[in-house]
Each structure stands twice: as C-alpha cells, then as structure tokens.
Image (cartoon, coloured by chain):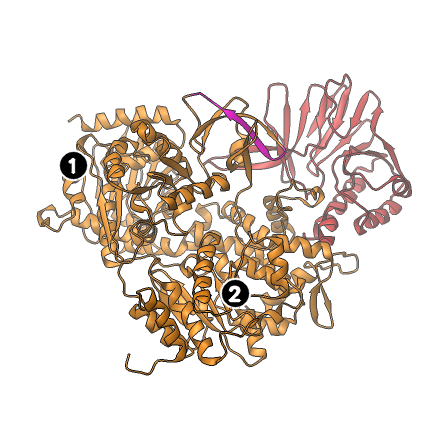
Chain colours: A red, B orange
Amino acid sequence: MEIEVLNNHLLLLPQRAIYWQEKQALILSDLHFGKTTHFRKAGIPVPEALFQDDLATLNHLVATHNPKQLIVVGDMFHSHHNNEVEQFAEWRLANNLLDIHLILGNHDILGKSKYDELNLQLSDVYVRDGFTFSHEPIPGTSSFNFSGHIHPGIRLEGPARQSLKFPCFLFTPNGCVLPAFSKFTGLSLISPAVDRRVFAIVGQEVLSC
Amino acid sequence: MAAKLSRGEEVILDWMAALGNKPFPFQKEAWDEFLAGHSGLLNAPTGYGKTFALFLPVIIEWINANKNWQEKKNNGLRLLWVTPLRALAKDLQRAMQEVCDTISLPWTVGLRSGDTNTKERARQKVKLPEILIITPESLHVILTQKEYPAHFKKLHTVVIDEWHELLGSKRGVQVELALSRLRGLAAEEGRTIRTWAISATIGNLEQAMEVALGAGASAGKIIRSRIKKEVEIESIIPDKIENFPWAGHLGTRLAARLIPIIEQSNTTLVFTNTRGQSEIWYHALLDTYPELSGLIALHHGSIDAEVRTWIENALHEGALKVVVCTSSLDLGVDFRPVDTVVQIGSPKGVARFLQRAGRSGHRPGAVSKIYFLPTHSLELVEGAALKRAALEELIEQRDPVLNAYDVLIQYVCTLSVSDGFYPKQIFEEIKKTYAYQYLTEEEWFWVLNFVTTGGSSLAAYDEFKKVEVENGHYQIKDKKIALRHRLNIGTIVSDSMIRVKFMKGGYVGSIEESFISRLKPGDVFSLAGRNLEFVQVKEMNALVRKSKAKKAIVPSWAGGRMPLSAKLGQVLRETYVTAAAPESFNKRTEIELKVLRPLFDLQAHLSHLPGHNETLIEYIITKDGHHLFVYPFEGRIVHEVMASLVAYRLSLIKPITFSIAMNDYGFELLSDQEIPINNKILHQIFSTENLVVDIQRSVNSTEMAKRKFRPIAIISGLVFRGYPGTVVKNKHLQSSAALLFNVFSVYDPKSLLLKQAFTEAFNEQIEEARLRDGLNRIYNSNIVLKYPVKFTPLAFPIKVDSMRENLSSEELKARVLKMQMQLEKD
C-alpha cells in the first residue's frame, strides 16, 4: 500500500513498518526488544520464539529494502538489559553500516553507554526534511509527525456478529501513528473519524478501511 | 446401644445429655464408622448437626486413647477441617471450642483463611492447634512454608465441609492436590489419614466420595442422614393470568403480591438471579411499600464487604424484614430469623432452588417455605416442575474437573517455594487423585518443563528462571518469584473490579471495570440501592456523588445469565407432557398447570403442545421473514450452539443466512429466504454424525477458548494479578491473557494450557455432552412440524429475547405490548 504525504511516497508494509522511498528510510515503532526475556526472567514462560521472529522480520525488512536509515520512534527496548539486547547487538554488528536513529520512548531505559555501544543516534524529537519524529504524538504540531506509543488497532466487523481486531496505521491530516512492530504487544482500539485514514494489517496485506 | 460405651462416648454423651440432647441416628452411625477407622462421605442437610457427626468422634477417639486427656497439651494438629466459606469458619470454631472447653479438653481450635491476621499466622507458623479450620487456598499457603511437613506429623483426619460446593470447581482440585500431599506425607511414616467429605444431596454422591477419597481408594462409607428437609413450595399465581405478560424477566409487576407475604413473615429473603435484577427489585419493593424503609436491605457481590457484614449481622439479630439478594446469600451461616424465602424468576436449577429454600426454617424439624414468583406466564410451569423435582429429589450432578493443567502448575510451584520436591514422588501422589488419574507421563514432563525451562528450545541464550533443578530436586530460590507465587495462590478469578467511592469518602461497593469504562462523567447508575452520579476514576477508585435523578442505568453484570440445568430442563419437558393432556388433569395436578389452561389451549389451537417423546418445531412466516422455532428445553448455552449447528447444516443444503435467538426453552432461526425443511432434512440436521467437525465449523470455538484462557493464565501464573490493594507496580510484567492466547497460538500451539482452554470451552461453553444428548433425543423423537399463522405462546418469549439484543429496554416494552396485543386480537 502506497501513500503520498507532501510529495513523499510511503510504503505501508504488513510487517508493521513504513518504507520512505525518497529517503530510503525504514520507519518503525515499539519494537520492545527484550520483552519476552524480561517476562521469562521473572518466571513467566512466554514463548521465546516470539523475539526470534521479530528479529527475523527486522532482518528481512532490511534485506529486502536495503535502507540507508532506520528511524525508530521509541520503545525500541522493553526494559533492562538482557540477552535479547545482546542478540540484537550481534545483528547490529553484521549490519553496522546502517544508520539507526532512535527517538527515545518511555520504555527505553538501557542508558547512553549501551546505545553508544549499539551505535544508535539518539534524540527526544527528531526532525528531518520537514517531518517530525517523536515517540508520543505531538498535539498541534505544524509539520507532519510520525509517532508510535499508542499501539493502534481497529475492530473490523464481519457477518454473524463476528468481529476481529487488527493492528493499523493511523493517519491524521498532520501525522501518522505507527502500529507496534513487536508481536508481543496488545492493541489500543481507535475509532474511525472523518479526518482519519486507517490502514489495517490483515495477515500479509494492508487494507484501507 | 447394647454395647458397652467407651470412655470417650461416655464423656460426649454426658455432655450432650447435660444440654438435653442426644445424637441423631446418623450421627451415631458416623461415630461408629469413624471409630472403626473408615473414611467416607456424610450426606446431611445444613443445620442438622453434621459438624458434630464428624468432629465429636475425633474427640471420643482421643479420650479413649489417652488416659490423661484432660492434661495433655500441645498435641499437634490432629484434625484439619476444610471449608469453602470463611463466613462459616468462625461459627464452627466457636462451636467446637465450646465443646472442648466444657469437657475440659485442653485443645485449641484454630482458624486459617485469607482474613487471619499476621500475628495469628506467625503463631501458627511455629505451632498449629489440635484442630484447624481452613480454606483450600490457605491450606496451599501452608504448603509454601519451609518445613511444612513437620506440622502434619500427627494429622490423622481431614474433613471437607460443603464438598458439593467445591466439587466441580478448580477449588475442589486444589483440595484433592493438598490431600494427595498430606496422604503422601503420612504414608512416608506408615500412617494413614481418614478423609470424610460432607455434602448436601447431589446427583452423584458416590462419585463425590471417590473424588474426596482419591481414585481407586479402598471403598468408603456413605452415610445418609435420612432427615428429609421439608420444603413447602408455593407459586405466586397472577390474579388475571390473561393479563400477565407472555415474556419478561423482571417480574416486578407482581411486587405488590409480596407485601402480605413479607408482613406475615418474620424475615424474608428475596432471591434474584442477577445483581441488576436485585437492584431493580429493591427499588420496586420500596416504591410499593415505603414503610419498609429502614427494614429492607440489598445484598449482592458488588456491595462493599463492610456493608454486607453489617446486613448479615442485622439478619442475625432479626433487625431486617426483607433482604433482596443474589447467590451472595446462597451459602454461609444460618440466619435464624429467616422464615420465608422468595425466588424471583427461574432458579435455573433444582439444587440451587432447594438450597435457597433451605435458607429459611433452619432449625431441625422446621419447614422451609419458599415462594416462586414467575416473571412471565409460561415460567409458572417451572413452578410445577420444581415441585416435582423437589418431591422426587431429582438433583443435579456436580461433575469433577479433570486434568486442570493450570492448577497443577500452580501446585508444583507451591511445593517448589517451600522445601522443593522430587518429581517421581509427586507424580505418584497426584496419580492417586481423581483429577489427575489419567495424567500421562508426557503431560507431567510438559508441566515440569514449563516451570523449569519455560518450554525453552534455545537453552544457550535463555534466561528463563522459575523452578531450579539441582540433583533432581526441584525448588524455587528467587525470593521475588516466590513472593509473587504466594500472592497468586488460588483459583477464584474474578473480573477486574474497581471500587466505587463517594467524593467525600466511604465505599459503596465495587463494579466491573468494563462497566465503569463505558460511563461518562454525569451518568447516573444504580448500586447498592442508591442512584449515583459518576464523577471520575482516580487511583483505581470510581468517584461518585449521590444523585437525585429518578432514572439510573442498572449495570448488567457479567455472568448473570445462568442457563437452565439439564435436570430442570428434563423435569420441565415432562411437566409439559402433563400439560399437553388436559383431559387427565386431576386433584393432584399442580395448580400452576391448571391456571395456565387457557394459554395451553391457545398453544394447542395455534400449533401443538408437545406430548411424550415429541419435539415441536414451528415454521412461521411474518413480514420479518421465515422463522423456525425449535424447543429442546436444554438451556440457552446448548441452544446457542445447537442453533448455530442447525443453521450451518441448513446452509449446506441451500445457501442461506440466519439470525439466531434463543432462551432456556428453545431457539429461533430467522431468514429472509424460505428455509428448506421436510421430514428427511429435519432428521439430518439433528444428527450427531460429524458433530465435532460441524461444531468447529459453525461456532467460533477459538473465541470461546480465548475467554476461557483468562482464568487459566492467571491460575498458572502467566498473568500476575498484582499485589493486593495496590495499583500494579510491575508495569513491565503486564500483559493481557488475550494477547498471551494469541502469542501461544502462533508460537507454541501445542501448549497444554491452550488445549485446556479449548477443552473447557467444549465442556462448559458448548456443553458438548449435553448437546449430543439433546440432539439424540430430538433425532429419536417424533418431530412434529407445524405452520402456525402467528407467534405462539411458546415462540413469543424467544422472539422477545432476540429483540432484547438490539433494542433499549423502553422501546422493547412498547414493542412487546404491541406484539402481544396483535396476538390476542382474535
């Protein structure tokens, strides 16, 4: 699904990411790396394959689109340091030419030295080519604002009183809220409105609702 | 009593004689069986000295065995008395301690439940009393203490009180597991433990005993008190049955009829089926009879515990004339002043009805008086059916829970928190329980793996930590994990509740978070009989102020709609067969059936009244479309699945879409197209062939399983409920059960916890066994297909129920009236 915003062309990907074609940049949000192991360390056996899958998806996206930059709009890591951070570090080493820019989210508590080690550019709000990137949406911003944090989802109704929930991209006139990249995240349901465009991720497709 | 009395019997009989008492025959029988070393089950109604039947022989035996029984102190725990109800425990303790004190037996009767204070807990940690009254949860908490086996060295008897309440629930499984450990400990030292269960009458007493005593245990004794509690059942017959509505669920139209009953009685309990209905009835009674002000109270699970305790005390003292309540007062201590009980609408089950009836006339010999107040005409038939069921003691079974992996995981962690365990030994113990007798070694290894490696396949990286294994010994060492586990013990999982508090302070009660989340500031809702204006949610409290508004939203609480039990459905079908043969009515025919004659005649005239071995199906065409009504009397849950199944099978014959409606008596399929029906098809669609496959294709079992997964996730420790009374601080460890269900479905589809969720959905949500029985019955019955020209008295309530789904209640009322008027015109 391709969207045009201010003469820029955005590919909405079913892997819960945006590919910004003009700038060859991948935009992602809420990766929550470390979450699975954070639970496991506390004795809650969430399947570890979940993180492996998320990391493989990231690897696949980078291999497919070969971006110059990765822009993460917050909550890249879930909590304190654990082996998932190390597994990401290994991946990072193999992809060290990639420019990764992290806009710090409320979960990003690893500390600057660790981010330096991982070779991440940091900022609280990042502005590039007339676009603003932040973790939480900035209300009333004048430039187009990419953000995350909310984990937007939408309920689609089917026949026989059935309904299903899907992660989605939420576009307003001056911003876009990305779905959470991690599959170990819940959804916060949003309701459609006149000035909102919602794109649901249904399996391997992105559908306009 | 020719045999020479033992010393202990003498002491006890003297004590009884001094009070002018002597043992009932069943009590004596229980003493003898107990003293002979047997285990078993005692079937006795509440209020008839069941406690003394099993507590006294423990004392008798002790006196017989110890010459210096009046001196010996600190004898260690000898009798463990498990009770599901905290409220009962205190009275029990008082009664038992009084006996000990009177006969100068220096024993202590202790109490242990979630309410026990820390000082008493600390004391019990050092030394347990001779008798301990305990809840299943607290028993497991004791199993988390270091060196817990030392406490049970002298234990020789476990009594499980109100076993019928525990059986059939995961709390019952908890009791089974604790018993297996206590028996295992005793066996190590060559001792045995006697187990006695006390149960009210249920349909499967033999099985109930086997569950308590353990699978394959040597035969126990069943003792029946043979005291038949006399129950007087009276239906409240509407003055003009012609004007009484054909559908409805509140029944407040008959409120005025309760006034003379209340006036004549000492204290009346009015039972409703839902909290919402109790709120409405509370107001209805006050409006009809304002003099009740100050003498009427409202009691249900959402009302603040302090208020409830106050009401219970007032009931004891006879200070209240009426209490409107829900199942919140089904159980618990006896309120002597209560002499009358009213049941509003269908009680949905025989056992529940009789239990409620038993809340009145609690003294031995007294008659329990219960009035049945119908909420619509045909519900009166249930009044007749309940009389029959009570007379013939046709009471529901309680089916024991099997292979609950979640409870087993919790138990394994419990043992790991204290002294740890060796798997081989524990596996042997749990194989002797009824609940896990079929557990395979493979499943056992899965459970062990779940708590030790978290099902890891990538050991190199993994940091999972819960139960640690050293030389084959399993133990939890991490203090934080141990603490979280202790706080998580238990199997009662309620919806997440939010407390309702006045702005100026003072709690009103608690209410589902989902209800509060739909309210806007300024909305008025009714709770605890008060109209409250919602202000805001602050720190896990919903702040409210009093409202003068006349209208209020009555919350429809989850779980309020209990389905009709199979037993009551069966009796109800048989009662209808009587109604279908009015020529055979005689003196003994229930009044309910006689007054309903005009309605039955109309049903017979418009369509047909199903007789013996008949199933009625009605095909009605209206401007809404084609309606197919089927009446299996199997309860709404079974009907929902059966309707989906039939709809699916019809759609295979011809592409067709239906909307579905149901109540406890039958269901309706509605389509804009003609429904393909003939006798051959009718048999086809009720066949049990390919049932499981067709169910999976016709109902959303995944969605049902997802709902079942929430309690499973909490019990097994996947979801941490947080520390009591505080807002959860471990935000980074929070995830919803629904999310975990999805995650496991994708990444660990073979997880036994998922399997359990689907099994529970099939057993409880789809009620597969009952569905199969129902289909077989219809398949083998004489199907009578009728084409009435308009809705019949049987069809009407289903039609109204289906409208309830998408209309607000006021519109509904108007429409029901209009429809009924149309019906009666000619």
Magenta part of the chain: B539-549
What is the x, y in percent for residue B760? 48, 54
Residue in front for this viewpoint, B296 or A140: B296
What is the x, y in percent for residue B784? 21, 46
Q: Return the residue at label 2.
A: B108
Q: Quadrant of the C terminus of chain B?
A: top left
| Secondary structure category for the residue under label 2 | loop
Residue in front for this viewpoint, A172 or B203: B203
- How crowded is the residue under tag 1: few (<14 C-alpha within 10 Å), some, or many (20+)? some
Q: Quadrant of residue B207?
A: bottom left
Q: Is residue B590 left or right of residue B764?
A: left
Q: Return the residue at label 1.
A: B602
Real-space Cα distance between discs 2 and 1?
67 Å
Q: Quadrant of residue B273?
A: top left
Question: Which is more N-terminal, label 1 or label 2?
Answer: 2
Q: Are marks 2 and 1 on the same chain?
A: yes
Q: Is residue B821 left or right of residue A5?
A: left
Q: Chain of mark 2?
A: B
Residue in front for this viewpoint, B418 or B202: B418
- How crowded is the residue under tag 2: few (<14 C-alpha within 10 Å), some, or many (20+)? many
Are dots 2 and 1 in contact, CB under 8 Å?
Answer: no
Residue type pointed to by label 1: Leu
What is the x, y in percent for residue B342? 29, 42
What is the x, y in percent for residue B510? 52, 37
Residue B775, compared with residue B559, is above or below; it is: below
Residue type pointed to by label 2: Thr
